[in-house]
Image: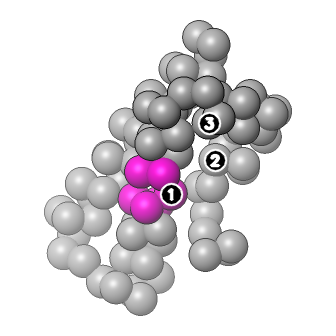
Amino acid sequence: MSNTPHTLGEDFPYEIDKVHSLKVVNIHFAKLLEDYDQVNDKVHRAETNVEPLEHFAEVHLRKQRAHIKDEIAYMLHHS
């Protein structure tokens, strides 16, 4: 979804080149990006009631998204 909020490009606008570089050379980082996009899409579909979820399931997805983003940020900062 191109209009999905919280895309990594929005969250790390000055790190785009580093994101692309790490994605190519680091399999774990590439997997984190894929996981983030999948979870972020699920959160967006829940928030827009395209695929409504029970409240605690939606909260869990948001926490999962935050955890993945924290790991991505850590790897960007330490690369």
> Is the C-beta separation of discs 1 and 2 under 8 Å?
yes
Say left or right for 39 vs 20: left
Q: Residues within 10 Å of mark 3 (few under 14, many from 20)?
A: some
- Which amino acid is tagged 1? Asp
- Please tell me which residue is depicted at 52% across the width and 20% down the height of the picture: 74
- Which amino acid is tagged 3? Lys
Q: In this view, does 48 lie above or below 75?
A: below
Say left or right for 32 vs 15: left
Q: Can residue 69 be seen in this view?
A: no
| Element carrying mark 3 | helix
- Which amino acid is tagged 2? Leu
Say which label, 2 or 3, has the lower sequence index: 2
| Element carrying mark 2 | helix
Residue 54, percent from left and from top? 18, 75
**Region in magenta:** 34-40
Question: In this view, which residue lies farthest toward the top?
Answer: 78
- Please tell me which residue is depicted at 30% across the width and 57% down the height of the picture: 61
Residue annotated with mark 1: 37
Q: Residues within 10 Å of mark 2 (few under 14, many from 20)?
A: some
